Amino acid sequence: MGVLKKTLLFFSLFSLVSGCAKFEYLYEQGMGQMTLLSQGKDNKDVLKSVRVPKTQKEKIKRIQELKSYFYKYWDRKETKIYSQTTMLKNRAVTYLVIASPYQEIKAVDNCFPLMGCFPYLGFFNQESARKFAKEKEAEEYVTWIRPVYAYSTLGYFTDTILSSFFEYDDYELAELIFHELYHTIFFVKNQVDLNENLAMYFSERMLPEYFLSIGQADYLVFEQKKDESNKKIKHLVVLLANELQTMYKSLLPKTKEEAEVILNEFMEERFKVEVMKKCQALDIQPKDCFPLNRSWNNASFAAFLTYEKKSNDLASLQKKLGLSLKDYYNWIVKKYEDFQNQSEEEDFEVYLFK
């Protein structure tokens, strides 16, 4: 079935079970996705084109190699994902809007029949993202808009390579491709946080094996050292976000203005001071200390925690089980199958770690 027919069929079915606002949102995003896919060109044609710079062609070749390595690693048959390339007009492919209550750090779920719930909404049109953010702010929520350079449609469509991928260096690109491809082999419905953390966990741990397999041990050591420093900084941000959450629970701000005062004081007196100390201890210059160079509020903290909060739990569980990465993956898959077959109503994340 072609992309257009699949898209129209999906929205015809969805209109029967969804409200007008959600239907309009999904229609706009579906048309954006269809446009994106329709602009994709076969990689072999892109690689022959004299209009495409050599550096971009090298990135496409590397992505093809990463894709082959990934599916061989997991003993899976290759799909058609990333067999085409789409050249974007902008650096970002889409924009995520995360909304959080002003008095706590918590991403507000957006739920859709058939598709489940997500702690964000994505928009291909930046103006639509801004409009939605303003609507949520009018409802007393705090919002954050994040540009996105890669994402997965989770098998609904055949994803293409996006020109935004070319912004990444070799190490980042490998992690990105492994991360997105992981979603094609394992995905838990209604568990966005867990899915992202699983994809991050397994993609990060595939990197050493990959770079050693292509004879780039020195490059791997350099990147791992940098990555280890970033993990320490990210861990500090998680701790500080939890500290701010505790403050909200203790002080119980009654208005958005009161919450902003708490946030601003925390950022000046605790967050910036502690992050600066950590970066100095790791010999990282302020301009390269990422938490100091981005805006923070409840929504951006919530988005950050989505990707970070379960990594340690996953590492501890693998260590406890004493399994290799591949065996650990198979164990999780089997655990999910058992979960789906059981009669109890329970969150898979709880079931996984209990």
Image (spheres, grey):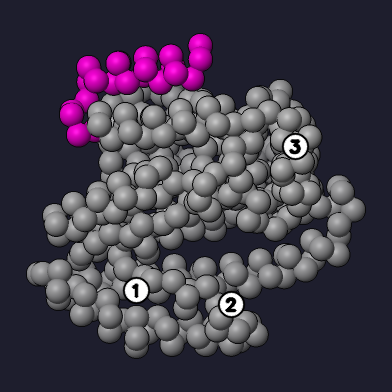
Q: CA distance from mark 1 to mark 3?
A: 53 Å
Judging by the rendered image, the residue that carries numbered circle 3 is 49
Q: Is residue 107 above or below residue 183?
A: below
Q: Amino acid at mark 2?
A: Asp
Visible residue check, residue 58: yes
Report whether 329 appears left or right of 235. right
Visible residue check, residue 324: no
Q: CA distance from mark 2 to mark 3?
A: 36 Å
Q: Earlier in the sequence, mark 2 or mark 1?
A: 1
Judging by the rendered image, the residue that carries numbered circle 1 is 243
Secondary structure beneath label 1: helix
Identify which residue is drawn at 10% across, 69% down: 255
Q: Is residue 246 above or below residue 153?
A: below
Q: CA distance from mark 2 to mark 1?
A: 24 Å
Magenta stretch: give its range: 1-22
Secondary structure beneath label 2: helix
Q: Earlier in the sequence, mark 2 or mark 3?
A: 3
Foreground label between 2 and 3? 3
Q: Is residue 143 above or below residue 76?
A: below
Quadrant where the C terminus is found in the figure:
top left
Secondary structure beneath label 3: loop
Residue 13 within the magenta-colored segment of the rendering = yes
Q: Amino acid at mark 1?
A: Glu
Q: Are marks 1 and 3 in contact (CB under 8 Å)?
A: no
Mark number for residue 288?
2
Residue 80 point in image, percent of width and height: 65, 25
Residue 325 point in image, percent of width and height: 69, 44
Residue 310 point in image, percent of width and height: 49, 54
Q: Nearer the viewer, residue 293 or 37?
A: 37
